[in-house]
Amino acid sequence: MNSSHQYQACIDACNVCVTACNSCIAECLKEDDVKSMAGCIELDIDCAAVCSLAVNSMARNSELAKHFCKLCSEVCLACANECGQHLHGHCQRCADACRACARECRAVIN
């Protein structure tokens, strides 16, 4: 299939993940101990950026899309592991979105 439609489930998961990461960033910055959330915020920023890159490559049907998806799955898992350590609802929602995105990215590269 020579269309970005082959990637649609992954594109959708990546877009959900970007939104979850950006929401997590905003909510982490409102926490009483923002400094303790620094690792979470940093990974959220990286994850949102890599997910956006993956979406753009898939939408263009880039020959490098699978490489970006591999990177995206790795960054999403790192972000999920960090967010999953925090009990805040926004962190847990972000971790769930990251895990789902990583699954879809792995499905694309397999």
Image: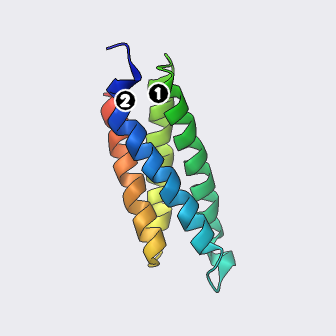
92 in relation to 3, above or below: below
N-terminal label among 2 and 1: 2
Crowd tier of the residue under label 1, counting other residues whose Cα lies within 10 Å: few below 14, some 14–19, many 20 or above: many
The amino acid beneath tag 2 is: Tyr
The quadrant of the image that shows the N terminus is top left
Tell me where residue 93 appears, x and y as whole percent: 41, 66
Tell me where residue 53 appears, x and y as whole percent: 57, 35
The quadrant of the image that shows the C terminus is top left
- Nearer the observer, 74 or 54: 54
Tell me where residue 32 appears, x and y as whole percent: 64, 86
Q: Distance between the residues labelled 2 and 1?
A: 6 Å
Q: Mark 1 points at which residue?
A: 58
Q: Name the residue under label 2.
A: 7
- The answer to whether residue 78 of the structure is visible from this angle is yes
Name the residue located 36 percent from the left edge and 33 percent from the top edge.
8
30 in relation to 43, above or below: below
Contact flag, marks 2 and 1 (Cβ < 8 Å): yes
Please say which color scheme the image uses.
Answer: rainbow
- Nearer the observer, 103 or 58: 58
Which mark identifies residue 85? none
User: What is the quadrant of residue 108 in the picture?
Assistant: top left
Tell me where residue 67 appears, x and y as whole percent: 49, 26
Name the residue located 44 percent from the left edge and 58 percent from the top edge.
80
Name the residue located 43 percent from the left edge and 42 percent from the top edge.
73
